[in-house]
Image (spheres, rainbow, N blue to C red):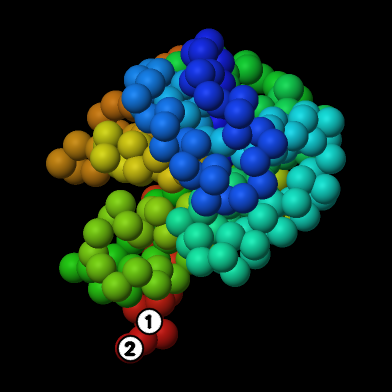
Amino acid sequence: MFPFRDKCSPANLFDKTLGVKNKSQQKRLAGKLHSNKPCFNAQIGLCPGVCAGTVSARDYARTIQHIKLFFEGRKSTLIASLKRDMKRAAKELRFEEASRIKKTLFALSHIQDIALLKQVLPRSSASVPHNSASFRIEAYDTAHISGTNTVGVMVVLENNEPKKSDYRKFKIRTSTNDDIASLREILSRRFTHTEWPMPNLLVIDGGKGQVNAAEKALAEWGIVIPVVGVVKDERHRPREIIGNMSARKNYERAILLANSEAHRFAIAYHRNMRRKIK
């Protein structure tokens, strides 16, 4: 959400932009710094380009202030500041900047309270806590016939037990028979509900394409949750589990149960929809 400089060195004239308030002067100064080669983090979007001079010292100082507010737990203050920046950028016709800030605000709205950040699970390469006090698994599946009347569902397991009060149904609005597009729509709609408990693990019905799509969407929204996928054989029986290795090792039975329950729930929902249409 807030790219910052890690190990790279600032461009030579970077500090000279700090006292410049005029936007055109800032751009002229920044333009002189582009000869510096951007660091690796800048090339992948984790550094704003301090090393290459693509960001002014004033704008970078504002980013650092946002990070400080974030770790101080002053989320409401941070959101208010970002909203002001977004409106200002839109008013000045800097629509790309306004769009970037909007994405940051969306990500912030889906992050748990700062006091709970230490409990957020690491990325897929790391381990998943085993048999915690309240371990929530959410599984997703879709159902359709030749791409028509597509529906999606979310089922929930808490401590390996189905929690049917938290099951949810989704009528897919995406006018396509693309399973990946349908999955992204379901996840997008699910994570707009910040009042719902955040899951510790996502189970997707599908292979590498579906898992990658889910991980990409979560990354865009600033959400860090391990994802696994259940790959089926030609008879639609579980063939293998892919994705987060630690989750596969520690929660195999729960993953398969969640996937099976999601499939059952999706089929039942779709049949009910077809009856209503007839």
Look at the numbered discs 2 and 1 and tell me whether their residues touch, using CB distance below 8 Å. yes
Left/right of residue 242 with respect to residue 64 in the rendered view: left
Question: Helix, strand, or loop for circle 1?
Answer: helix
List the single residue furthest toward the left. Answer: 234
Picture coordinates of residue 155, whole percent (x, y) = 54, 49
Quarter the N terminus occupies: top right
Residue lying farthest to the bottom in this orientation = 278
Give x and y (percent) for residue 59: 62, 39
User: Three-letter amino acid code at disc 1?
Assistant: Arg
Determine if residue 37 is in view: yes
Give the SS element for disc 2: loop
Task: Determine which quarter of the picture holds residue 228.
Answer: top left
Q: Give the residue type at disc 2.
A: Lys
In the picture, the disc for residue 278 is 2
Determine whether 270 is above or below 83 in the image.
below
**From mark 2 to mark 1, how far is it between C-alphas?**
5 Å
203 horizontally vs 157: left or right: left
Report crowding for label 2: few under 14, some 14 to 19, many 20 or more residues within 10 A (C-alpha). few
Q: Nearer the viewer, residue 98 or 135?
A: 98
Residue at figure coordinates x 50%, y 32% from the top left: 48
Q: Is residue 254 visible?
A: no
**Residue 252 place in picture, x, y as percent:** 45, 23
Residue found 28% across the figure and 55% down from its top: 179
Observer-nearest residue: 173 or 241?
A: 173
Residue tagged 1: 275
Q: Nearer the viewer, residue 116 or 205?
A: 116
Locate residue 239 relative to residue 22 in the image: left or right.
Answer: left
